[in-house]
């Protein structure tokens, strides 16, 4: 109970710590991000902006100018569409007439064309192109952010054409050149910090998976690595890395889709570990199927539809993951409370930025980097959960290793004890055989004709006692050999009727034994010596513990086991004696003797030895009551297995 309370307290403390780390990380991230999303800390020279949709996507500029525009403020959120977006921008000049930079976010927009009044040809327009489809060396503004350089002398109207297969999310600001450079530096700093945090979490996960080979951490590491690459793509850092390469848009589309897919696979692995119910996981499986559909749409060239399906899957992931977390049944730490809190926060972060991406709600400035904010939240929450879980698993593994070490030490000690026991038994057997032989010679000398009947009875008792001692010694030695290593088994064709007849003749009370042999018998291949020891022990027990002068029955029949394997059955039946019925649960245990069996000498090894021999010969031994008689049955297969 105390351990459970300590674990619960540790879980609450870890959860509080994780939430604090999340809050601090978000503050560190959002403080430098805020000016970058609003006006970059400088004066924005955009006086007004308006938007127009070009459904045909092929209208000339003159036709666009003639049509009405809809004013908007802040961020344009057009969702996923094949339409071309036209922006009308009115920009005022700098007081000193210096250059301006039309800075455009985000950096993953495919094609941007800026139409500026032609100063040479009145009424004419000149155009410049940018976007991530354009190689880095051909862009008009040499920065990670997309942009154009302007130098209006009066308040001037510009037209910006946006054609992208990603979501039509766009924010425009016109800054003085030095202010734009400072904004780029600030953005690079917080983006570098952001990437450093994500990369550190990814490297930790990869290292932890290398050590533990835990599937959940492996899935988290894969998802985190893909997300780092995805972040590099949407921030625009792949373009300068690859120079003049033109595959950046397609690579970005694939990374966006794979980021959602690998994240879903990780969550499925995590919630399976938490033993979420089948109906709870059904929603995740449906989202994975949707992610696969998005991949197929990408392969078929339906990029906008693929990205829309991908965003819908990401949006629905929030509530469906929370439902699966609520169905979790595993009580092991990290507990379900921590899991549910993490998924509630994850849901809130997803609901905050995906609807504007789809064009369902108006976009605020921070939505431009909503994916990064949500990714940071998810990485910290899930990374913290995995770190907590990895520590607990490592502690459990250490405890298991400690228990294994103790078990190995106990096994080694037991092996040493068995070796020492074997040596002792060998020594004892050897040392007892010599005095026993001397005693037998002395007893045989007492058999002279002049000895009276009393002497003969004493001699019989001594012989029986010697036989008991000899049997105990032999049983101890054979039991030790069977337990400590496999005995040497010499299999050969056995003549069972002759073997059993010899065993009966060798007993001291052979007249009491009734031998019944069923014909015909199948041929038996086994070890006759070990078989003789087993049957001899059963006979000895029956004669010893049955009432005096009562018959003991020895049966030999052909029999098959419960699986239909051909074999022979040997049964020994006798009436219960003063010691009562054997204990069915303990009859074959080593050194076990009945509570009322003390009137007879014995070692408690006879039946234990019979079972060991039966197992080595591939057979079975059973005890049962048969019409009021004690029945021990030995079954052996005809051929060795």
Image (tube, grey):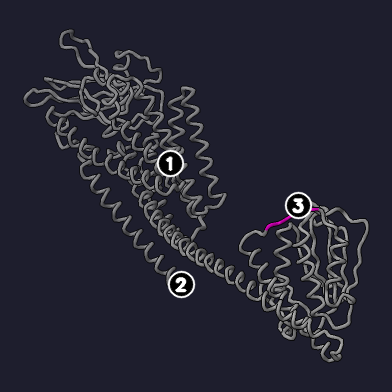
Q: Which residue is mark 3?
A: 640
Residues under labels 3 and 1: Cα distance? 56 Å
Is any atom of residue 559 visible in this view? yes
**Residue 137 x/y as whole percent:** 24, 19
* Magenta part, dominant SS: loop
- In this rendering, the count of numbered labels is 3
Mark 3 residue crowding within 10 angstroms, few (<14) / some (14–19) / many (20+): some
Task: Name the N-terminal-most of marks 1 and 2.
Answer: 2
Looking at the image, the residue that sits furthest to the left is 96
Residue 571 sits above or below residue 137 on the image:
below
Q: Which residue is mark 1?
A: 263
Q: Secondary structure at mark 1?
A: helix
Q: Is residue 490 magenta?
A: yes
Part of the protein shown in magenta: 488-492
**Residue 351 x/y as whole percent:** 39, 44
Residues under labels 3 and 2: Cα distance? 53 Å
Mark 1 residue crowding within 10 angstroms, few (<14) / some (14–19) / many (20+): many
């Amino acid at each position: 109970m105390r351990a459970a309370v300590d674990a619960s307290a540790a879980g609450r403390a870890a959860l509080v710590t994780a939430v604090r780390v999340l809050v601090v990380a978000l503050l560190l991230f959002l403080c430098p991000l805020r000016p970058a999303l609003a006006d970059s800390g400088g004066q924005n020279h955009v006086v007004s902006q308006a938007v127009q949709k070009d459904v045909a996507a092929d209208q000339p500029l003159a036709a666009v100018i003639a049509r009405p525009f809809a004013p908007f403020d802040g961020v344009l959120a057009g969702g996923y569409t094949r339409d071309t977006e036209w922006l009308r921008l009115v920009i005022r000049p700098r007081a000193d007439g210096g250059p301006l930079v039309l800075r455009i976010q985000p950096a993953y927009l495919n094609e941007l064309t800026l139409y500026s009044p032609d100063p040479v040809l009145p009424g004419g327009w000149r155009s410049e192109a940018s976007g991530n489809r354009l190689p880095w060396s051909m862009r008009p503004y040499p920065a990670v952010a997309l942009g154009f350089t302007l130098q209006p002398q009066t308040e001037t109207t510009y037209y910006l054409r946006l054609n992208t297969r990603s979501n039509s999310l766009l924010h425009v600001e016109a800054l003085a050149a030095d202010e734009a450079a400072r904004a780029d530096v600030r953005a690079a700093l917080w983006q570098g910090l952001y990437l450093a945090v994500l990369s550190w979490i990814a490297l930790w996960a990869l290292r932890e998976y290398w050590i533990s080979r835990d599937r959940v951490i492996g899935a988290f590491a894969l998802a985190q690595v893909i997300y780092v690459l995805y972040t590099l793509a949407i921030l625009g850092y792949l373009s300068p890395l690859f120079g003049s390469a033109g595959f950046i848009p397609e690579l970005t589309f694939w990374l966006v889709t794979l980021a959602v897919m690998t994240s879903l696979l990780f969550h499925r692995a995590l919630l399976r570990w938490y033993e979420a119910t089948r109906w709870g996981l059904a929603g995740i499986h449906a989202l994975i199927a949707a992610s696969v559909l998005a991949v197929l749409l990408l392969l078929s060239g339906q990029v906008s539809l693929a990205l829309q399906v991908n965003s819908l899957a990401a949006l629905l992931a929030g509530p469906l993951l929370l439902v699966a977390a609520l169905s979790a049944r595993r009580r092991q730490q990290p507990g379900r409370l921590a899991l549910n809190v993490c998924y509630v926060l994850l849901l809130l972060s997803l609901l905050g930025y995906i609807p504007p991406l789809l064009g369902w709600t108006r976009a605020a400035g921070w939505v431009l980097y909503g994916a990064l904010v949500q990714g940071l939240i998810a990485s910290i929450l899930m990374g913290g959960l995995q770190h907590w879980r990895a520590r607990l698993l490592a502690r459990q593994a250490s405890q298991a290793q400690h228990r294994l070490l103790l078990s190995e030490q106990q096994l080694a000690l037991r092996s040493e004890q068995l070796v020492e026991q074997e040596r002792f038994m060998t020594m004892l057997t050897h040392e007892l055989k010599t005095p026993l032989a001397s005693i037998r010679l002395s007893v045989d000398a007492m058999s002279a004709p002049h000895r009276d009947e009393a002497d003969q009875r004493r001699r019989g008792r001594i012989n029986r006692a010697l036989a008991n001692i000899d049997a105990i010694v032999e049983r101890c030695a054979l039991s030790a050999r069977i337990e400590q290593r496999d005995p040497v088994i010499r299999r050969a064709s056995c003549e069972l009727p002759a073997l059993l007849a010899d065993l009966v003749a060798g007993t001291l009370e052979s007249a009491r034994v009734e031998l019944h042999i069923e014909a015909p018998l199948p041929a038996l291949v086994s070890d006759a010596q070990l078989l003789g020891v087993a049957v001899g022990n059963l006979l000895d027990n029956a004669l010893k513990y049955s009432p005096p002068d009562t018959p003991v029955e020895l049966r030999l029949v052909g029999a098959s086991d419960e699986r239909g394997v051909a074999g022979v059955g040997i049964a020994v039946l006798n009436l219960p004696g003063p010691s009562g019925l054997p204990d069915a649960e303990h009859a074959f245990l080593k050194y076990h003797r009945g509570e009322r069996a003390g009137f007879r000498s014995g070692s408690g090894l006879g039946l234990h030895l019979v079972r060991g021999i039966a197992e080595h010969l591939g057979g079975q031994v059973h005890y049962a009551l048969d019409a009021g008689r004690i029945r021990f049955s030995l079954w052996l297969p005809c051929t060795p297995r």
